[in-house]
Every structure is written in structure tokens, then in C-alpha cells.
Amino acid sequence: DWRKLLNTLKESLRFENPFEREDKRKIHTAGENEQLIAEIESTKSERKGGAMAIDVESKLSNITDEKKSLAEELQRTKDDVFEAVTNLIDQVHILKSCLENAKTTIKDSLDQKQACVDRLESNERKFLGEIRLLNECRRNLHNPHNRVMQLSGNIRVFVRVRPLIPIEQKFPQDHASTSVPSLSLLASRPSSRGPHCDSLGNSAAMFQTISFPDEEAIDVTQPPKYLICGNKTWRYYFDRVFRPHHTQEDVWTSAEPFIQSAIDGFPVCMFAYGETGSGKTHTLIGDKENPGLIPRSVKKVFNAKREMEMNPKFCVSIKVELLEIYNEEVRDLLDSRSGPDGQLIKLKVNSDDTVRNILVSTDNKDEVSEILELAQKRRCVKATKSNSQSSRSHLLFTIHFEVDSDTESSRRKGCLRIVDLAGSERLEKSGSTGVLAKEAKHINSSLLALKEVISKLQAKEKHIPYRNSKLTYLLRDNLGGDSKTLAIVCCSP
């Protein structure tokens, strides 16, 4: 084809531009360079990959060895832990067995100890009972006083007839006595001379003649001119009869054994009973020249305290309380608010004793004397036709005597309660009206309740009506049981 040949010739004969040729050469050189660079990079990559592979293989080998070592160490640890756990389990079983044995041993030991404690407590109770019995025997052997008191009777009744006062000597018929009813209430034996008359309250009984056949009897005779049925005489027997000429010292001599019983640890009650103006307060309290039973008892108690405390093994404490029963209300005369000019302090009486009353600890008899004087000022006293200074309440003076001793297993507690009773009275004789009549009613009812209690105690009956009066209820521990009771019946001639 001539056209193709012509074109080829043109192409071969075409003038070649040097710049284009240089550019082509650069482009070709650049392509070669890139190829070389690619080959170099490929070679580097191949070399680097081989080094890395070698390094990875080395590390993998190390990791494999370390893993194997750790596995072996873990296995050894597992074996050690298993062995330790096995040993611990064995030890736990051993400890459990030891614990069960210890529990059994301790239980047996506790049972034995409890049995020993029970035996010791039983022996202690037995020994304490024997000690109390021995102390009682010792007290009876070394102090036959209590045995004598028991043989003489725990309840004893004295009678004291006071002398005539000047106005009675001047006008005897205007002041005739009516003491026979009081005598008949507490007489220990019935009349043994002449017919017994039940009509002691009639008008013929207003004039009486008394005589004293001996120291334990008193005769009351009515003059014949005042009688319709003839001459009648009543004889009453008592443990002791004091005539008008007997002194305070004579009464104290007979009553002193009761105070000794209180010192020995027995409950003792002494009270004066009789109509108003018969000398009850004088017998119990007296005056500075002729002290009564209370001041003399206080003196004896403190003398006993001083003698006991000369031995360092003895410690004696004495407490005093003063109560007043007015219209069946219990009052505390040691309260500063009590008394006729102050507030009337009423006390409640529960199953044990009075509630929240004041007990004063004393160290000498002078303090007790001051307390008595203060109580006398606070006591309810009013004037009646029978007595210008008639006590309208019952006065309860109590001494608590407690002895602590190293030679005795328990504390010895004695209680001496001396009661100045309000006087019984007849309303038509005393002329009491209004408040005085109400007071006389409460006084007579409480005295009647006291008479009933003493009568049932002497008859040894099972039920004793202590609750019939506040007076008998407060005196219940000092009247029954192994207590010693002295009733002093005061009579007007």
C-alpha cells in the first residue's frame, strides 16, 4: 500500500524535537525509578517480614515455655492447696470431735457443779436453820429471861388504880368511878366472889367500893343502899395490881422485863387502857420528877446499846417513830407540818406497815426526849367535862432496836411499841357533842376492837380480826405470834 509506506517514510523523516525527547527520557527514567523503588521496598518488606517472623517465632517459643512453666506451677499450687484443704478438713473434724468431747465434759462438769451447789444450798439452809435454833437455844440458855416470859404468858395484864385527886376527895359523889366495865373487858379470870352481875351500866353501878385482897386481885363492891337485889361484889384477877400508893418505880419494876425482851429481838407492845382521866398518860410518860414507862424504857435501851457496843463485834442502831390515830386516820407526829396548828398529815396503811412515815435515827436518850416533847405538843388534846386535857387520839411510840453481830448469822431486830390509848368515855358523863362526840365514837370503837383481838388471842382462835380498826391493824405484829404484850388497865378510884 503506497499510502502506508508514504506515511512511514514521513514519520521517519520527521524532525525530532530535543525537548520532547528529553521529556520522554525523564518520563521513562522516572518510571524506571519508581519500579526500582517498588522493587527495593518489596525487598525491604520481604527482609523485614522474615526478621519479624523470626522474632515472633522466638517470642512464641518463649511464651510456650512460660505457659508450660506456669501450668506446671499452677498444678503444683493446686496440689498444695488440695493437700492443705484436706489437712484443714481433717483438723476441722478433729476439732469438732474435741469440741463435742469438751461439751460433754463441760456439761458433765456443770451438772456435777450444779449438784454440788444444790447440796451446798441445801446444807446452807439446813445449817442456817440449825444456827438459828442454836442461837435461840443459846439465847434461852444464856438469857433465861425469855423462857421466864414465855412461862409467865406472852400477854399479861396489869391494873393500876390511881389515888384520889383533891377535887374527888372534896366531892366524892360528883366524881364517882365507872371503871368496872374496863376491868371486865381485860380481866384474865372471871369473878369468883358473889353473883356475877351483867348490869354494870345501870345507875346503881355509879357508886362503888374497891378493895385489894392481894397483889393479883381487886374487889369491886356496890354499897347496899343503892342496890335492889342486895349486896354484890365482883372480884377480878390480873397478873399484877397496883394500888393507889404504888409509885412509878413500882410499875417500872414489873414492866422492865418486857423492854428486855425487845432488846433480845422480840416484838413487844405495851399500852395503857382505861377511861379518860384515869392516869394513862401519867403512867406512860409521867413528868421530870416521876418519869413514866416511855422515858425509862428509852434509858434502858440506850444503856443496853452502850454495853453492847463496848464489844467491837456489835453494832447497834436505834430508830424512833411516832404515830397518832385520830378518827381512824393515821398521822405522823414527826412531820413538821403536823399538829393542831399545821396541816393534818394522813398516812396510808398497806399490808406491811404505814407508808412514808418518818423514822428518826437517834444516838442518845436526850434526842428521844425532845422528840417526845414535840410529839406531845402536836397531839390532839381537848377539854371535856371528865378531863380538862383529854387525849382525843391514840399515840403510838415505837423504838426499832437492831443489832449487827459477827457471831450471829443474821441481824437481830427488836421492836418496842408503847401505846398511849385515848380514854374511853360515856357521852352523858363527858358531855361530848359535835366533834367531841364523833371523836368519842371512834375512840370507843377502836378500844372495843382491841379488846376483841386480845380476847381471841387469849382464846388461841385461828382468825384474829386485826382489820376491824387501824389501831389493831398497826399493832398486829406486836400482839400475835411470839410477841410480848403488856396491857396496863388504868382505873379511877
Image (cartoon, grey):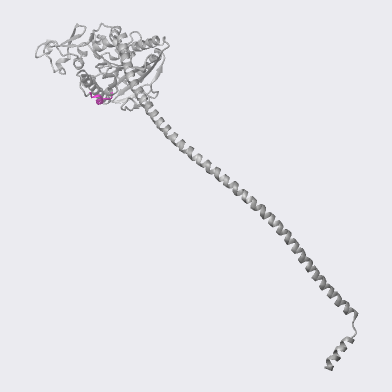
Report the side of 182 relative to 409 (left or right): left
Of all residues, the one furthest to the bottom in this rendering is 2
Q: Position of residue 190 (x, y in %)?
A: 16, 14
Picture quadrant of residue 336: top left
Which quadrant holds the C terminus? top left
Question: In the rendered picture of this protein, how many numbered marks are placed on residues?
Answer: 0
Of all residues, the one furthest to the left in this rendering is 229
Asked if residue 416 can be seen in this view, the reply is no
Whether 190 is drawn above or below 88: the answer is above
The structure residue drawn at horizontal position 19% and vertical position 9%, both measured from the top left corner, is 217
Residue 467 sits inside the magenta stretch: yes
Q: Which residues are magenta?
A: 464-470
Picture quadrant of residue 232: top left
Picture quadrant of residue 284: top left
Whether 121 is drawn above or below 103: the answer is above
Which is nearer the eye, 445 or 237? Answer: 237
Which quadrant holds the N terminus? bottom right
Which is nearer the eye, 206 or 143? Answer: 143
Asked if residue 470 can be seen in this view, the reply is yes
Whether 95 is drawn above or below 61: the answer is above
